[in-house]
Structure formats: structure tokens, C-alpha cells
Amino acid sequence: MIFENNLTFAASLDAQDPLAKFRADFHFPNSNGKEFIYLCGNSLGLQPKSAREVVELQLNNWQNLAVEGWFEGDSPWMFYHKELKELMAPIVGALPAEVCPMNTLTVNLHLLMVSFYKPQGRRFKIVMEAGAFPSDQYAIESQVRFHGYDPAESIIEVAPRAGEYTLRTEDIEMVIADNAADIALVLFGGVNYFTGQWFDMPAITTAGHAAGAIVGFDLAHAAGNVPLSLHAWDVDFACWCSYKYQNGGPGGISGIFVHERHFSDTTLNRFAGWWGYQEEQRFKMDKGFVPERGADGWQVSCTQVMPMALYHASLLIFEEAGFICPLRTKSETLTAYLIYIVNEVNKLLGKDLYQIITPSAAADRGAQVSIIAKENAKLIFDELVANQVLGDWREPNVIRLSPVPLYNSFTDLFKTGELLLRISKEVAG
Ligand SMILES: *Cc1c(COP(=O)(O)O)cnc(C)c1O
């Protein structure tokens, strides 16, 4: 598509957008009655207008049924997770039995590593991406220590080549192959939070399995963003948060994936709790933990009804939108348009003030464009916010803008470019 940097063109793309109507399903932040252009859905997705109603339904259940709510009402809490599983499965490309909503993301990362990081003899190392989100770094480091190993010796980080910002798949594959006999676990992000790079997950999974390792993914920036086929790709386990691209609300509930292949493996360690116990027998309160079959067997505590209701509200919107495929089609065009717009700003300034570090190939990125501002970066970012364009700032000089296909428009991106040009002229002369 040949893009144009003008409002008429952006508006014409919006007029042809089959998802345009979903924008009205979300609350946009505003100040003095003026709505922000919101490009921060990679950090916290917007509130679906339906969230209040879905939560209110559960508040009413609690009010009117109290403890009976576990088994009474339209959707008894005891089985509420099953409704969500059906809606979560298409988002990550899994069987409903392979996914379950529970806890929060880093907690689930720990619980899954308890099961799937099984260091033994020479095979104790973990391969991960350099510069992973800090919580993942800390979780992995502390798991390694928990097993009595030294993180410095046990964690192999794959880093970009000198002068590059993103990883090459062949480099990831080579690190895995070169260390094949030593690796217990390959644990990668799906989409990197800093650069927006979408890693070649099937290639990483194949390489990890060829090395004899278990392969897991943190999908915080991938779930609800890019099309995933966790089951078909043969991924061993994964987890994600619901509050970024899936609009599940701040601190919202996390989801896990465990491949069907592992359902009958009785050798897996678990940090168990009563809610992971076989559902039919749970209330016998017997001694000796017997897990429920599937991802549900990793549950620890009883159903978190309110966070699940928030996630539910958003999942229903995904269902109505046709889950990921239609969103992805729009998303690729949105990011391509944003990259074009930023390059136009450089052109109109007559200098390359902005450098995009997100991959230029649509297949290698999610719904995020990470931009280095070479001068006055923080000042530029602050001016964007002051003028009601809300992106996200990362030290030392990166502005992340995330156009989300469910609620962002091409006009949002044109207006952002117009503002960026004006600010750049003011602050960078
Ligand atoms: C957002 C994010 C987290 C946050 O973890 P919480 O436990 O939800 O606070 C962790 N890992 C990655 C990769 C993330 O992007």
C-alpha cells in the first residue's frame, strides 16, 4: 500500500476499517474533557465499557447469593474459569484444556518453572534473551539459585550483534545448538517488550527440542497481539498477563498454557494447592494431592472471580472481533503506517532525529514501534504527553508507541506524526 501523510488519507483507511466500530467499546483517558490519543496498550489496555457490567453481575451474585454463589446463579464461580478457557484458547492457539486463568504473571512463571525447569547432572542451564523484562530475569535468576546453581554459570543470554538492537533467529538457534548438552530450559519472550520484536517462536521451539530441552514462553507482549499456535508449535508451557493487549485491568489475572503432552506426566513437580486438586473430589478434602487433568491442575488458590470478570469482559470483545486474525491484519497496517509517519517526520525535519529499532518486516514485530530520539528524547516524550498523546517512555531514549487494532485508528497515527513534527521543530531546532 502506498501511504500518504495527510488527514484525508488516514481517515479513508479508517472508513474502510472493518474493526473501526470496536473503538466505541472502550473508555479513553481524558483531561479537561479532551480525550488522549492512547498508544500505550502494550503497557495497560483500555477499559472496555462492558467491564463495569460484567463485574457488577458478579457483585450482584456475591450480594444476593453470598457463599451459594460458588454453585448457584447463572455462572457459578466454581466453574467460571471454564467459560474463560474457551475464550482464551483461540487467542493463544491452544485446546481449552491446555489453558487456565489464574494468579498473576510472574507468579505463574515461577509455578511453571517449578514444573518445567528440571536441572539434572550436566543439563542445568537456561537460555533466554538478553535484556528480557526484569521480572523474568529476576524469576529465572532466583529459580536457578533455588536449585543451588550460580546464575552466572547457568543463564545463557542471547544478545543482539554489535550495532544491532534485535535478535537474529540463526543466532538464537546457534546458541542453543552450541550448548545443547547443557540446556535444561529455553525460556523466551514471545514479543520483546523493549524493541517490539516478535521472535520466531516455532524455530526457537524446534531448536530447543532438538537440543533435548524444554521450551517455554512469556507471552506478556504477545498474547492478544500476534497470532499464536502454541499447541501446533509444540511449545511446552507459556504464561501471559491479561492487562496489556487483552485489556484485563491493572494487575489483572494471568493465563497459563501447558501442552497436552504433559497432562499425564506424574514426574512433574508442582507447588500445589487445593484448587488444582481433581475437581470432582476436591471437597472430599482428602490427604495426598491428585491434580486435575490439564492446565487446571496448576491452580493453587480458589477462583479470583473479580479479576476474571474483568478479563471475561474483554475476551467477549475479542470473540466478537473474530479473535486474532482480523486484528492482526489491521495491526500490520497500523504499525507500517506509524513507521512511515515517523520516517516522514525525519524527512520533513531534514535529519534523522528518530531511529526505529522495531523490525521493519511486519512478520517480525507486534503492535509496537520503538523509536530512539537521538536528541532531547525525554523532553520530546513529555511534550507528547502534555499534548495528549500517551505513549510510553523507556530509559535512556526510547519512546514506545503501540497502536492497538481494537481501539486505535489511522487518524490517531496521523495526528501523532503531526504533533511529533511540531515538537521536534521546537525542541530540536
Ligand atoms: C509486563 C511483563 C511482566 C509483568 O509481570 P507481572 O507479574 O504481571 O507484574 C513480566 N514479564 C514480561 C515479559 C512483561 O512484559
Image (cartoon, rainbow, N blue to C red):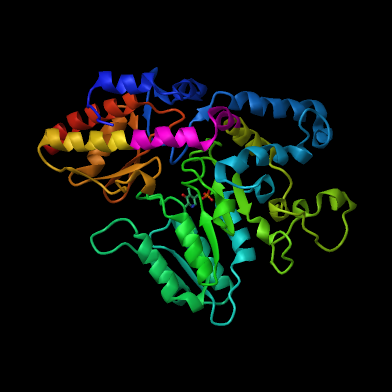
Depth order, front residue of 271/81: 81
- Compared across the picture, whether 423 is left or right of 199 comes to left
State which quarter of the image contains the C terminus.
Answer: top left
Residue 46 screen position, x and y as percent: 48, 31
Q: Is residue 131 magenta?
A: no
Q: Is residue 185 visible?
A: no
Q: Residue at x 58, y 31 (%)?
A: 319
Range drawn in magenta: 316-335
Residue 52 screen position, x and y as percent: 61, 25
Depth order, front residue of 65/129: 129
Q: Main secondary structure of the magenta part?
A: helix
Query: In the image, is residue 393 above or below residue 178?
Result: above
Depth order, front residue of 237/49: 237
Q: How many numbered markers are drawn?
A: 0
- Compared across the picture, whether 91 is left or right of 343 comes to right
Q: Residue at x 59, y 27 (%)?
A: 51
Depth order, front residue of 8/271: 8
Q: Is residue 199 visible?
A: yes
Q: Residue at x 50, y 78 (%)?
A: 181
Q: Is residue 326 magenta?
A: yes
Q: Quadrant of residue 56?
A: top right
Q: Report the residue that reaches farthest toward the bottom.
A: 121
- Compared across the picture, whether 115 is left or right of 142 comes to right
State which quarter of the image contains the N terminus.
Answer: top left
